[in-house]
Structure formats: C-alpha cells, structure tokens
Image (cartoon, rainbow, N blue to C red):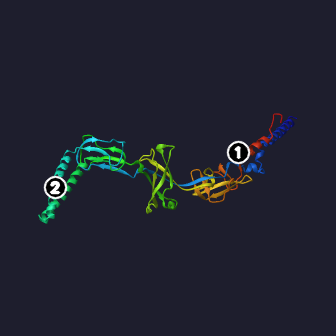
C-alpha cells in the first residue's frame, strides 16, 4: 500500500513539472523560426531627403602671409645720429626723413666744391667770348671747359654726400623696426630701419597643376586665420605663375587683398580659391557617406523598407555636401544615421516605425499565480 502511494505521488510531480515547462515557453514565442521579424530584425536608421541647393568647389591651401614691398634701410654714409624722426609703428610716405646724421663735414665739403665750381664757371664764361673772337687758343678754351665740367661733377658728389646724412624712406609703409638710437655712431651700410607696405601683403600658394584650367586672374578667394577666429577676408588671384614646378607638379598662385584689415605679415592663414559655384545642385549630405577605400557609397531607402547601396561619383564636393554626377533625384530618402553596418538589401526601421520586438512582448501570454 505504501509503495502504491509513493508511485502515485511521483507521477503527479512529473506531470506538474511538464505543465510548468510548457507554460514557461510562451514568453519566447517571438523566436519562432517561421517569424521573419525575429529572425531578420530591421535595423533602426534615420533618413533625410535629397535636396537642391548651392555648392561650390574650392582649392585649399595653408600658407604664411608675406609683404611684397618690404625693405631694409641702410646708411649710405658714416656719422653720428643727431635726430630721430620716426618710431616703430609710424606710417611714412616715400621720401620722408627717418633720421638725421651729423653733417658738419659734408656741409663743409659741399661749400668748398661749390666755390671751386663757381670759380671755374666764371673762368669759362670769361674765355668763351675770347675764343669766339679768336683771341685765345682752342686748347686754352677746351681746358677751361673741361675744368668746369669736372668741378660740376665734384659739386654733385658733395651734394650727394650731404643728402646721405638725411636717411629717407625708400617706400611708403609702416616702420616695423628701428635699429639705432639717438647719439649712435653709424657706419657705412649699417642696417637702420625696416619698412613694410602692408597694402602689399599676399599669400603665395602652390596649387596642383590639375587645377590650372580652373584659375583666372581676379578669381575670388577666402582667407581665414586662427589668430582672428570667426573672421574671413576677401582676396583675389593677383598672379598665376607661367610655369609648373616640375618636381612638385604645382603652380605658384599669388593671392592679394583689396583691404588687408588686421592681417599682418607672418600670419598663418587658410586660403580657399573658389573654382566652381552652382546654385541649383542635387546635394547629398556628407553624413550619409560610407567609404570603401577611395570610393563613396550611400544607402537609398526603398518603398518596402529595404535599402539600396549606391556608388556616388562626385562632381563637386564642399565641407558639408556632395553633388553626384548622376543617379539621384530630389526627394530620394538617403540614410544619414545607422548606415555603418548596413548591407545592400537590408531591412530598416525608421524612428516612427513600430518596434516588432516590443509588439511581441505585449502580445505574449503572461502567467499568473492562478495559472
């Protein structure tokens, strides 16, 4: 009797266990192999329509600014500095006196030369009518004429030496360096000042020869520098070198400015030369691009929520967009987020689409204590 009771109890426990196992399978009904939503889940992505807009092609380069008119002023005679007429930062016109040297010796030499020349000139003027009347020989007249010319040249030399005691600006510009002080003894050919014409500031770029056909004199360029963040300056192509550098395959292009503003020589700048500009182009956002080596691809959304992987052949590229040569229309929906792991033909789900996994959870049976 006891043995019969034990066998009956064992059968009841086995049946109860089987019933519990069967009931626990219901929450995983979503993994049914026959359900494609669970075996091949849609990839969540974001899309944006293809639009039309403006785009431009540019040639970019980074260089330091330099001044085409920059001179070093040297002394042309030796003496002591008696007057300083300018300081660093002063604007000067061509010919302005920058400093005055002691000119006592030069003044004396000039006056002596002037006296000698006047004496020779008077002698020549006295002998000229005598020669015309054949009262003196031709040789005596020629000697008087020669003496006058020689002393005239000596007077010009003395005047030049006197002028050299006033150091003048050879160009108009800004005094960027003063290298002498009042009272200094200046030697011949000593470096005294630096002067720069800031209106002659340029950026010299070296552009690939493939871009040469897109460049013309006067073409606009944009210039920006990290020293002046947020500011862009308008430049233009002033010169294009007539030859190509054989070693580098580049062409030297000189960018000038109509208004240099706060730009200064030595500033490091980024230059963009606008080579092509279109106002009504098909635009693909760079956010949508997937790169495979040097090739670019995008995923276009189909009506059945699958995507098509398309090669993009760029026509114009800027910082934000790409204009393709062909293959796209305005309004096409292109994947702009979530495309990194996509494959051609993959199923996708947009942010507003229902989530199948959450739907499965809501429809799955729930066990209660009563069950």
- Residue sitting nearer the eye, 252 or 173: 173
Q: Nearer the viewer, mark 2 or mark 1?
A: 2
Q: Residues within 10 Å of mark 2 (few under 14, many from 20)?
A: few
Image coordinates of residue 116 in percent, x first then y, are 16, 53
Image coordinates of residue 157 in percent, x first then y, are 22, 53
| Cβ–Cβ under 8 Å for marks 2 and 1 | no
Determine the residue positioned at 34% across, 49% down: 94
Residue 198 visible to the viewer: yes
Query: What is the quadrant of residue 1 in the picture?
Result: top right
Q: Is residue 369 left or right of residue 298?
A: right
Q: Is residue 240 left or right of residue 164?
A: right
Q: Is residue 189 left or right of residue 44?
A: left
Furthest-front residue in this view = 133
Q: State the residue position of label 1.
A: 351
Q: In terms of secondary structure, where does tag 2 sit? A: helix
Of the 4 image quadrants, the one containing the C terminus is: top right
Image coordinates of residue 251 in percent, x first then y, are 46, 60
Residue 188 visible to the viewer: no
Q: In terms of secondary structure, where does tag 1 sit? A: loop
> Between marks 2 and 1, how big is the CA–CA gap?
108 Å
- Residue sitting nearer the eye, 181 or 4: 181
Q: State the residue position of label 2.
A: 122
């Amino acid at each position: 009797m006891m043995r019969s009771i034990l066998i009956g109890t064992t059968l009841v426990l086995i049946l109860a266990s089987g019933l519990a196992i069967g009931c626990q399978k219901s929450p995983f009904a979503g993994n049914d192999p026959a359900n494609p939503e669970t075996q091949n889940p849609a990839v969540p992505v974001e899309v944006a329509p293809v639009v039309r807009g403006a785009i431009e092609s540019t040639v970019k380069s980074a260089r330091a600014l330099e001044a085409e008119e920059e001179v070093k002023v040297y002394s042309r005679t030796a003496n002591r500095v008696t007057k300083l007429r300018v300081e660093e930062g002063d604007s000067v016109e061509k010919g302005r006196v920058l400093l005055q040297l002691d000119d006592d010796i030069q003044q004396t030499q000039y006056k002596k030369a002037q006296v000698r020349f006047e004496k020779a000139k008077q002698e020549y003027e006295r002998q000229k009518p005598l020669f015309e009347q054949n009262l003196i020989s031709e040789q005596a007249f020629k000697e008087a004429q020669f003496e006058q010319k020689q002393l005239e040249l000596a007077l010009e030399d003395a005047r030049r030496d006197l002028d050299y005691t006033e150091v003048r600006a050879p160009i108009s510009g800004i005094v960027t360096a003063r290298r002498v002080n009042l009272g200094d003894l200046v030697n011949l050919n000593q470096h005294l000042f630096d002067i720069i014409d800031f209106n002659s500031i340029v950026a010299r770029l070296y552009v690939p020869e493939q871009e040469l056909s897109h460049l013309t004199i006067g073409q606009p360029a944009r210039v920006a520098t990290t020293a002046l963040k947020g500011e862009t300056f308008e430049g233009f192509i002033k010169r294009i070198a007539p030859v190509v550098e054989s070693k580098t395959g580049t062409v030297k292009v000189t960018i000038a400015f109509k208004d240099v503003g706060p730009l200064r020589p030595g500033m490091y700048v980024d230059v963009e030369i606008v080579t092509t500009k279109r106002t009504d182009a098909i635009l693909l956002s760079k956010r949508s691009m997937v790169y495979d080596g040097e090739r670019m691809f995008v995923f276009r959304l189909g009506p059945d929520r699958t995507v098509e992987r398309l090669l993009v052949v760029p026509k114009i590229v800027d910082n934000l967009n790409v204009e393709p040569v062909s293959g796209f229309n305005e309004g096409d929906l292109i994947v702009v987020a979530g495309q990194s792991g996509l494959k051609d033909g993959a199923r996708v789900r947009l942010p507003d689409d229902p989530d199948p996994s959450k739907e499965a959870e809501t429809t799955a049976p729930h066990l209660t204590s009563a069950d």
